Amino acid sequence: MKWLITGGAGFIGANAAKRLAEHGHHCVLADNFHRPGAKFNRKFLSATCNLPVHYLDVRYSDQVDDFFAAHPDTDVVLHLAGQVSLVASIENPRYDFDTNALGTFNILEASRCFAPSARVIYSSTNKVYGDLFSLLYGESETRYTLLDYPQGLPETLPIELHGGYSCSKGAADQYVRDYRHVYGLKTVSLRQSSIYGGNQYASEDQGWVAYFVQMGVENSPYKISGTGKQVRDLLHINDLFTCFEKIAVLPDDSPAFGEAFNIGGGPSLSLSLLELFDVLRARYGFTMTYTAGPPRVGDQKVFIADVSKAERLLGWKPEVSIPEGLDELVTWSRRQWGR
Ligand SMILES: NC(=O)c1ccc[n+]([C@@H]2O[C@H](COP(=O)([O-])OP(=O)(O)OC[C@H]3O[C@@H](n4cnc5c(N)ncnc54)[C@H](O)[C@@H]3O)[C@@H](O)[C@H]2O)c1
């Protein structure tokens, strides 16, 4: 199969490309190297699987059209290019909008014109559900809990777009689903929870698991926002990759096309920040020294995905345990940042 991957030098893109190449697929990768870590992943892909990453800025339709026109035999478009930080989206809303909303629109239009039979997979986000402040929460020693959703949060939650990143990703999510209904494109929108794994060049405000692992490896003190009882479900990159592969081989008339899916680890693979720090101390001997500040505006107290729709329509569910996933990330992080 031929895969065209935007954001190919990003964390998810580089991991997906490496595994696809190992599985004998043909990958064409594009990125504008906006993210600082992208240049390292570019080198990694060249060294490990001889895969080049081509320059492409999804904000510009002429560049996108030329790129797609050169690859009309594409079977799967994996659209990962994105501005990924909420903080950066507020500092530079135009770049955020142009990349996430307009960039995704450009990818959909190019797919419609140059690769109309391809499957189009979009990496959306659970941030399309907003701050979720209207839900009922409990509180234990180490975490907040969702009182009304023991199986996690379903796709039927109302969409609530607040803040640049959430608005631009939510607009894109809507277009992705609509291109199925209006033009018949085989699109799927994956509303991803926290994805973690090696090759993630994280920052304080994006990629929290990799960021805290790096702080542990470096033995650096760090700051957190809020109490640390905020909970997320974690999905290891290998599980997300399996999800991509399942979508690639869905039958043409699958009811999954045009749909959005909450894609995360679910209740059994969830951790609060405090719980993650405890695991990192106990399993790897990290010190994990932090100071707590005020909560981030609009930060969800808990997001745990209900993955039953994905299980039903995609035949997918997460399988990588947290210790197994963290071992992989810590090994990579020690190689990168170990002293
Ligand atoms: N990692 C997560 O936990 C997570 C969670 C939810 C959603 N997502 C979404 O998944 C996608 C991939 O995320 P990631 O974690 O690999 O992030 P990443 O930042 O590592 O990768 C995104 C890539 O897009 C590239 N890019 C940015 N602007 C671009 C532009 N205008 N044109 C072309 N390329 C551009 C960056 O250089 C980077 O390599 C993003 O769309 C993100 O919003 C990720």
Image: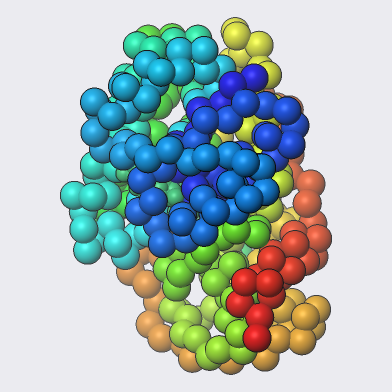
Answer with left or right where residue 98 lies relative to residue 132. Answer: left
In the rendered image, the vertical position of residue 153 relative to residue 247, given as above or below: below
Answer with left or right where residue 183 lies relative to residue 191. Answer: left
Viewer-nearest residue: 64 or 54: 54
Q: Which residue is drawn at 63% across and 50% down?
A: 47
Viewer-nearest residue: 78 or 223: 78
Q: How far across and down, in percent of the image, does residue 173 sit?
A: 39, 34
Q: How far across and down, in percent of the image, does residue 97 sit?
A: 24, 44
Q: In which quarter of the image is residue 274?
A: bottom right
Q: Which residue is drawn at 72% across and 57% down?
A: 269
Q: How far across and down, in percent of the image, does residue 288 sit?
A: 63, 87
Viewer-nearest residue: 40 or 242: 40
Q: In which quarter of the image is residue 326?
A: bottom right
Q: How far across and down, in percent of the image, does residue 331 sit?
A: 74, 69
Q: Which residue is drawn at 46% across and 56% down?
A: 39
Answer with left or right where residue 235 lies relative to residue 31. Answer: right
- Whether residue 225 is visible: yes
Q: Which residue is drawn at 52% across and 40% down?
A: 52
- Assign the N terminus to one quadrant of the image: top right
In the rendered image, the vertical position of residue 20 relative to residue 128, given as above or below: above
- Whether residue 303 is visible: no
- Assign the C terminus to one quadrant of the image: bottom right
Answer with left or right where residue 309 lies relative to residue 202. Answer: right
In the rendered image, the vertical position of residue 123 relative to residue 288, given as above or below: above
